Amino acid sequence: MPFKISEHTADLRVELEGRSFEELLLSGFLAVLEVLEIDASSPAVERVEINLRSCDREGLLADWLNELLFHIQTRGLHFACVEKLQIDGDELKAVLCAAKGGVKPAFEIKAATQHELKIEETEGVLHAAVVFDL
Amino acid sequence: MNRVCPSCGYNRNSAVSASCQRCGKSFRTSASFGFTMAVLLLVAGTALYCSRNLYKKTSFFRGFGEKATGFSTHLRDRVSGVAARFKKSAPVPARKTDALSPVQNNAVPAVPAAVPHELSGMVLLKGGKFMMGSPANSGESDEHPQHEVRLDPFYIDKNDVTVAEYAACVKAGVCHEAQGQGCFSEGDGFEKYPANCVVWDDASKYCSWKGKALPTEAQWEYAARGGTETTYSFGNDASQLGAYAWYDRNADDKPHPVGTKKPNPYGLYDMHGNVWQWTADWYSYNYHGLDGTNPLRSKKTSRYKVLRGGSAVEDADAARTANRFRQDPQKQDKTTGFRCAAAAR
């Protein structure tokens, strides 16, 4: 998996990696589903468009994760796939497929914070550690 | 309401966040704490009364209630539980390019050098559990037993590999040109048609050349189902098939350009009909002997590889999601094509 999850005091720390910023965002997508223990398959009947703008990549990553959490926890959507992910400067455009209802996340995450969030590159691989506020 | 962090100056459009999402410092100061709390309580009442849609608000208040009663041992245990699951996992492996074909290695390769914009024509599927095969009393005998399969996340091409895409591999000296009657070739206006007449080895080489691999049979079926357990990805009614597939009733006995029918629930085109699609697995007469997690029949159990999806010359029954077909991997067939997949790791 392109991520690793560990304890972080009262919160949860997830280390993401990707060979591009887009892949880092996709790793974040998979990590959120893993943390919330969403495992079942169901027909994807809804297309979700996500459009975000942030002043830097760290902000965009945190906003992306928070947007996913919003759709999962507040709207009750169950994401199955990412059809499109486009980064253009400080803008992110994504299309995801999702099912509605029927899956209850095992966890409730309040937010992905930007606390100590920094995207760093090592040997061509981007790394970021995100702390989720539980 | 815009909040400006007193520590780092980060400006965030959030009415209720208690702390800066950039630096983690509290918005509250001792001098304004009482006032802030009063504002928060007012906003809380408003939010609880009129809004269930603003995530940042509702999620904060749920969290605030938990913190007000103390961070419970129960919640701490849940955190430890999730973390513990991942402590057992090996650290994220370093990526490397393997010179061998991924199928020869009995493994699906990592994604290409970098996933470019728009996923480079692929869809990321989250994986998980699904029921593979046909229920008892339906389908062909080789579709049984229906069994639960768990898959890791993976990418899969939205479309079958086209003539133009395959031609690039031929020009690079990696793949062999497909020749024969009914085989499409570049320059004849067939660029957007599925690459047909490609033998299994060349299909596998093409995918490796792109840093991918042929999908395993399980990956193919998971992708084709789109989360459904019905006969087709759109339901059980074959009369709707014409909207999703080129098959014997509408295709005039020849494949058509890729992506010209409706996609399945995962946004994948031509998972029913048009051309059969090679998979990585060797064919066997049933599903016995396979792992429940990321199964791949890599050991030669017959002379055939598995084809999936039906084709332009086959009937609606062949286009069923669970249907399997076997083919000599050396055979060039005008109704056989392929698409690629890649592990998300």
Image (cartoon, helix red, strand yellow):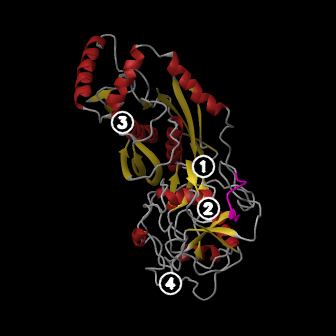
What residue does disc 3 label?
A74
The residue that appears at 42% across and 49% down in the rendered structure is A98
Taking the image as shown, residue B257 lies to the left or right of residue B18, namely right
Q: Residue B148 carries which label?
A: 1
Nearest to the eye among marks 3 and 1: give it. Answer: 1
In the rendering, at what x and y percent does residue B26 appear? 39, 20
**The stretch drawn in magenta includes residue B289:** yes
The residue that appears at 41% across and 13% down in the rendered structure is B69
The residue that appears at 67% across and 55% down in the rendered structure is B108
Q: Is the same chain shared between marks 1 and 4?
A: yes
- Amino acid type indicated by mark 1: Glu
Disc with the residue nearer the chain's start (1 vs 4): 1
Taking the image as shown, residue B7 lies to the left or right of residue B43, namely right
Q: Is mark 1 on a helix, strand or loop?
A: strand
Q: What element carries label 4?
A: loop
What residue does disc 4 label?
B253
Q: Is the same chain shared between marks 3 and 1?
A: no
Report the span colored magenta.
B281-290
Of the pair A80 and B185, the residue shown nearer to us: A80
- Amino acid type indicated by mark 4: Asp
What residue does disc 2 label?
B143
Badge 1 density bin: few <14, some 14–19, many ≥20, Cα 10 Å: few
Taking the image as shown, residue B85 lies to the left or right of residue B30, namely right
Taking the image as shown, residue A110 lies to the left or right of residue B327, namely left
Badge 4 density bin: few <14, some 14–19, many ≥20, Cα 10 Å: some
